[in-house]
Amino acid sequence: MSEINKLKILNDPIYGFISITNPLVYDLIQHPYFQRLRRISQMGMTYLVYPGAHHTRFHHALGCMHIMQKTVAVLRFKGVDISDEEENALCIAILLHDIGHGPFSHAMEHSIVENVSHESISLLFMDRLNEIFDGQLSLAIKIFRGQYHRKFMLQLISSQLDMDRMDYLKRDSFYSGVAEGNINSERLIQMLNVQDDMLVIEEKGIYSVEKFLVARRLMYWQAYLHKTSVAAELMLTKVLKRAKQLTQQGISLECSRPLKFFMENHISLEDFDNTILDTFSRLDDFDVISAIKEWQYHDDYVLAELCRMIINRDLPKIKLHAQKVSKEEVVRLRLQLMERTGLTEKDAAYFVYRGTIKNQAYNKKEEPIHILKKDGTIEDVAEASDQLNLKALSKPVTKYYLCYPKSLNF
């Protein structure tokens, strides 16, 4: 009986051919925990704004692994010593960095489970896979946790110029059609180097970094923080909040068993064991969408109306303001809705609400993007750049939103 060929070549619309050159990587991709990422959308509800944005976390993870392979090859060419074991660990760590995402990626983070980030759940999955694969992921986990002595390896996985950001900007720009988000990842990778155990960009690559940061800012305003995307994702979290509230009151809701489990139980990070992790691994976009399709006909007006609005893309009006929206304005709109529908003030809050969104392309307080100058000195990109707008990009911009049904008078 012939064995499966685990050395595969995949075709990707962004990079062309992606190679799986290691049997362990193949086995990890084939595992049900990872295959689940095919059913987790990369950009949440953004497809309601950009119809092409239906790509998944599976696409993104493979793309990250591919550019990690390219980066290791470039660094080795420049004399950076990276062993085969370290290369394998880097590829595994970036491949699995998003494995803990829940349905619709960021849209439902902290709501399926109680205040638990996807990074924490990713680590739980990695630890579990390490048990299944007899400790072969130990070095990858060590790098991912920042516990490995070679600091630049963590920067490749998690920093302000990491493989994650390089892939998602290029990929999300491609699928959404937002051309302003496109970056030259090939050029950025070619300019990478390591100095004093730090990841640096050679000075001649500074304009590519500037383009990268500008693209990131524009993608946030035009795609990730597009006001209609924000409104849809807020509605999605409110659907789950209402469903949880009704379930806690003993009202039975039709949905899949994994979703029902997380609605009936308050699960924190400390509660996760292998059984709960397996239950979480069976939860994806399809559970949520099928539940919403069913719940739009429920007797509870709030749940049914929220679900109907999502299914039919009858989204609320969302207005952005430079100043914080007054509480009085929110109360006025809620009273208007209460008069029309007979809702209580508490229930009206599901339809009229305010909040904030923030966009910061570059954070100087975090570990900076280091530019390696020709004289061997290292400088923060915001200082090294001759573009004044980079300093502006490092300042956070806050906008305030107000959501309310379109039928109300603002």
Image (cartoon, rainbow, N blue to C red):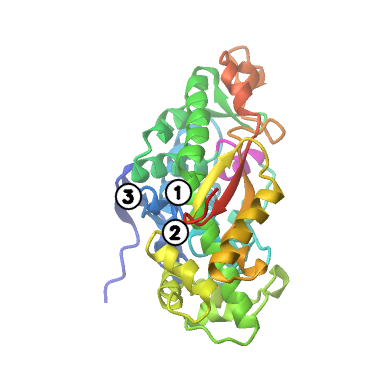
Q: Quadrant of the N terminus?
A: bottom left
Mark 2 secondary-structure assignment: helix
**394 and 9: which one is in front?**
394
Label 1 belongs to which residue?
65
**Alpha carbon separation for disc pair 1 and 2:** 10 Å
Dot 1 falls on a residue whose secondary structure is: helix
Badge 3 amino acid: Gly
Precedes in sequence: disc 1 or disc 3: 3
Residue at the (31%, 70%) spot, across then down: 3
Mark 1 and mark 2 in contact? Answer it, CB < 8 Å.
yes
The residue depicted at 34 percent of the width and 48 percent of the height is 18
Using residue 304 as the reference point, say whether residue 324 is left or right of it. Answer: right
Q: Which residues are magenta?
A: 151-161
Mark 2, residue position: 25
Quadrant in the picture for residue 42: bottom left
Give residue 306's position: percent from left, percent from top: 49, 67
Q: Amino acid at mark 1?
A: Met
Label whose residue precedes the other's in the sequence (3 or 2): 2
| Front: mark 1 or 3 | 3
Tell me residue 337's x, y (percent): 57, 62
